[in-house]
């Protein structure tokens, strides 16, 4: 199969992108860091098809990518990894307990904001614990996992896990007097408080959803509250709240959760936040969202601000294909989110309920933040040895056969090695290729040395005057051992240097802090 | 977003499947093995969107999955990873040389044969070398890479790399007298020789494609030929063949290729096979296909055989949704394939040509073969320590806090650990969970031991009478060090045992061979 037409539009579809070079290296590193944490907690991974039979996702179907009807089953690209997981559990009735992680792409026909990592095709990294257990223990472990992930990714001290409970929210709305049929719409309105001022949210509740103004005002008193155990205690003091059965369940849940988080040394990152509602219908218990600097928009998304942005860009407000990267009313959003969903599996299986709690990490957003703060360039490949031929003039054979044979010996020993695909390469061109790739060692073949059963190894980038600057002759008999020895030595030295750098950095920060304190 | 309807069909779409448990562990292991080889050769990885703008794939469009027209751009799921790579190179004109690998899913609306690993959604692992270099050096390295991959996957001595060249095939068809406009159709017919007898292929050429019978018979004399350098020499002796310009180029290519393969110690796996044609239009130079036992169908796909199979199954021959797993006229097919394609990038970019050579590994088929030959069960998770509470009776607290705290210490140190999500778990239930997971160590907490600042560590599965069968008391002060020491020691012991097993296996095979020879 090959392309026929002569004229192609050479781009990726809107809201999608290629990943390569240093971006790819960084993203793989992020995946590895997250996977290591997941495995540390006993996670096992699954993989599901990129499309599911149509109809698994209810609302918001305008965001769903459908496959064309080409005969046979109708399918849609997956919108998240949670519904496929629930479908998987419903299909596999023998699995009653599982800690599963899934790192894969999901698809949303949303308005993209490419620079902020908001794409139509993007990766999610999900960890979920399914099964019946004693209450709140897996919920606490999920939050501990979020801690480990963000600490390992370098966000230590720079993120907050906003936490709430559906049971508390439902109780709160009941106590405030929200009619049953308005609880979900009012909940969605509250969820916008991270990007809109209260006045606008209140307006939406009253004008659009038809809530009584005095009920909205009562809600307004609560949803500004944030804290930890102190807030829980405060709410429990309120006789009206603590008389509500849903609220009582929520209190008991959070009480237990805080106790377990403390044992996990994971309480300090959590903020119990009554404004957190989460849009998704299927949550039944605790909900959480991890935010960091840049998660919220830099400018509140009032109607006026939105119009101002649209005017400035000369576009219509709400053009669905327009990229919103430069729109200050659009933030990066949360960098992870999740909660407990006890009824989703039952919706698919019909009978068997498998309660679940989980979290989804927004790796593309995490990537954008880490990339923006990166100073050091990373290598694109991992080659350790560049095999070169030394020589010139009309008698120079290029030693292609010898370079190939030596590469083959290195490959056989598992050593990462390359050479230039040229019969008679110039030494300079070979050194340039090695430098461009950041390859740490050059193995230089010369006619005379080969005749003596020897070859020269040279560490790249040594400073002038270094005793090994000119390289060392090693015996071909011990080629593999000699090369491995030097690679290992260099890796160890690099690691130590990196550790030293980090210590200096910490030192510097502490010194700065001390100086700042002294001068304050 | 949540599902609305109450009745769902709980299955994956046709020709797709979930991956989990031991299958997933094995597949990840295969990916890791292949990736290690790719990196050893300086490969860098890229990731492209799962769908491309429509029209990138010309022929065979009935096999292409299209996305529904929901407004905006029209897109299709990618059919392979080669066209996206060519599109990527056409878009990134600054990249003139790259060794890239790409491991990702591709989509074909083909008739599935699930048990033989022929799926509609399946993984490909591609390695391609793009750029202008001295001839045949990268081509040889690709074949060397195929060698390393299959050796590392345990196929040593069990695979053949069938090799041919488009230039030689074109020359051959010209010399035999195939009209220019029939060269591609005749080439596709030749390509079926691995599953159909020559008589049927000849019939297709003459009856369906309208080739003169005497031309077909001349082709028939050549396409049965197989060899290495000997065959190349034989063809060169033929004055008519060696007068053909396309043939001359093909001879020169293979001459060089064989020389380089010899230097790479990779010639012994190659079979120069004039029946290999490869279906894809875009190949311009060497082509290859890796086959193993089971690649070819067990019964030739004659018309009679096909009808027999259809009759036996009570179905119509050619029902597109029917699974063909049990059809003996369908083999596993090739387990890797590729070749040189020098013009594909230019088809997209319009001007810039970037010559490429590459290979694609059919990992799902490779998986099926390895799985069928596996005897040892693999673990599903990687947990090293199961943290348990010892005790019972009405005073038993369950030590949940202590288990949590100790797990947190282990996690902080990067140790993979779990505990039972129960406030007061039975010791038996905890041991069962550890055993089910294949966890090597139990860390057993008891009130008395904790009071003394100690905890018991016990290696699971030790035989009765082993000096450490009852476990050892270790100090909580050195918890992390003590646990790490035992994990490392056990890993080393397991590795040595595995090496010993492999030696025994090789010994056994050699012994069998010697006995067989002696008795022959």
Image (cartoon, coloured by chain):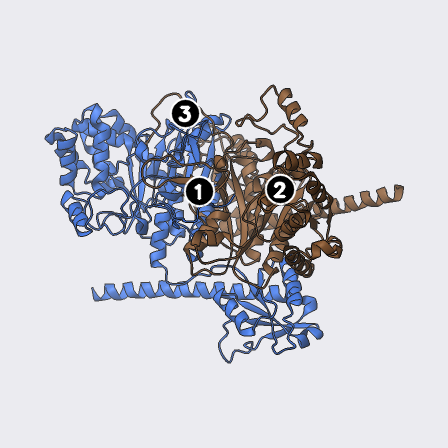
Chain colours: A brown, B blue
State yes or no: discs 2 and 1 in contact (Cβ < 8 Å).
no
Which quarter shows the C terminus of chain B? bottom left
Q: Is residue A253 left or right of residue A1?
A: right
Regarding mark 3 in the picture, which secondary structure is present there? helix
Q: Position of residue A52 (x, y in %)?
A: 42, 44
Q: Residue furthest right?
A: A519
Q: Which mark is residue B348?
A: 3
Q: Residues within 10 Å of mark 3 (few under 14, many from 20)?
A: many
First in residue order: circle 3 vs circle 1: 1
Q: Is residue B507 left or right of residue A86?
A: left
Query: Marks 3 and 1, Cα distance to the nearest angstrom?
Result: 22 Å
- The relative height of residue B372 versus residue B500 in the rendered view (above or below) is above
Q: Observer-nearest residue: B429 or A391? A: B429
State yes or no: discs 3 and 1 in contact (Cβ < 8 Å).
no
Q: Which mark is residue B271?
A: none
Q: Residues within 10 Å of mark 1 (few under 14, many from 20)?
A: many
- Residue appearing at x 58%, y 21% in the figure: A315
Task: Find residue B317 and report its image quarter.
Answer: top left
- The relative height of residue A433 versus residue A39 in the rendered view (above or below) is above
Q: Is residue B140 left or right of residue A164?
A: left
Residue denoted by label 1: B103
Q: Residue furthest bottom?
A: B465
Regarding mark 1 in the picture, which secondary structure is present there? strand
Residue denoted by label 2: A186
Query: Marks 3 and 2, Cα distance to the nearest angstrom?
Result: 51 Å
Q: Observer-nearest residue: A122 or A439? A: A122
Query: Marks 2 and 1, Cα distance to the nearest angstrom?
Result: 45 Å
| Chain bearing mark 2 | A
Q: Kindly tell me whether residue A493 is visible in this rendering.
A: no
Q: Observer-nearest residue: A71 or B343? A: A71
């Amino acid at each position: 199969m090959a392309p026929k037409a002569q004229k192609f539009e050479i781009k990726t579809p809107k809201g999608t992108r290629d990943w390569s070079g240093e971006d790819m290296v960084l993203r793989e590193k992020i995946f590895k860091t997250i996977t290591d944490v997941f495995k540390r907690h006993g996670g096992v991974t699954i993989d599901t098809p990129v499309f599911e039979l149509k109809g698994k996702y209810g609302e918001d179907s305008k965001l769903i990518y459908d496959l064309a009807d080409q005969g046979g089953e109708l399918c849609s690209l997956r919108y998240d990894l949670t519904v496929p997981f629930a479908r998987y559990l419903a299909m596999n009735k023998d699995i009653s307990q599982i800690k599963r992680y899934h790192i894969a792409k999901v698809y949303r026909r949303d308005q993209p904001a490419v620079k902020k990592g908001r794409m139509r095709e993007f990766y999610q990294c999900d960890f979920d614990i399914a099964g019946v257990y004693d209450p709140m223990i897996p919920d606490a472990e999920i939050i501990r996992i979020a801690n480990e992930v963000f600490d390992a990714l370098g966000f230590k001290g720079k993120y907050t896990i906003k936490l709430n409970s559906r049971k508390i929210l439902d109780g709160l709305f009941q106590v405030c007097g929200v009619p049953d049929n308005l609880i979900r719409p009012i909940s969605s309105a509250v969820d916008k408080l991270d990007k809109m001022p209260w006045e606008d949210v209140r307006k939406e509740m009253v004008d659009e959803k038809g809530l009584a103004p005095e009920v909205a005002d009562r809600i307004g008193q609560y949803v500004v509250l944030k804290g930890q155990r102190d807030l829980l205690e405060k709410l429990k003091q309120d006789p009206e709240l603590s008389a509500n059965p849903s609220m009582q369940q929520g209190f008991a849940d959070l009480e237990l959760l805080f106790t377990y988080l403390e044992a996990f040394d994971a309480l300090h990152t959590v903020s119990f936040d009554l404004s957190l509602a989460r849009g998704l219908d299927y949550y039944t218990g605790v909900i959480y969202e991890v935010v960091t600097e840049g998660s919220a928009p830099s400018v509140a998304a009032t109607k006026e601000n939105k119009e101002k942005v649209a005017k400035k860009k000369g576009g219509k407000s709400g053009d669905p294909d327009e990229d919103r990267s430069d729109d200050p009313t659009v933030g990066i959003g949360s960098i992870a989110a999740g909660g407990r969903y006890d009824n989703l599996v039952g919706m698919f299986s019909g009978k068997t309920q498998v309660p679940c709690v989980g979290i989804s990490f927004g790796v593309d957003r995490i990537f954008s933040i880490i990339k923006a703060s990166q100073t050091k360039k990373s290598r694109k490949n991992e080659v350790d040895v560049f095999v070169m031929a030394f020589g010139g003039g009309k008698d120079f054979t290029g030693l292609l056969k010898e370079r190939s044979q030596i590469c083959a010996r290195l490959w056989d020993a598992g050593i990462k090695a390359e050479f230039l695909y040229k019969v008679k390469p110039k030494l300079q061109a070979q050194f340039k290729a090695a430098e461009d790739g950041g390859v740490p060692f050059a193995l230089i073949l010369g006619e005379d040395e080969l005749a003596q059963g020897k070859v020269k190894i040279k560490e790249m980038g040594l400073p002038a005057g270094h005793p090994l600057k000119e390289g060392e002759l090693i015996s071909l008999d011990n080629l593999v051992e000699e090369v491995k020895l030097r690679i290992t030595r260099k890796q160890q030295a690099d690691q130590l240097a990196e550790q030293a750098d980090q210590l200096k950095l910490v030192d510097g920060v502490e010194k700065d802090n001390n100086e700042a304190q002294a001068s304050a």
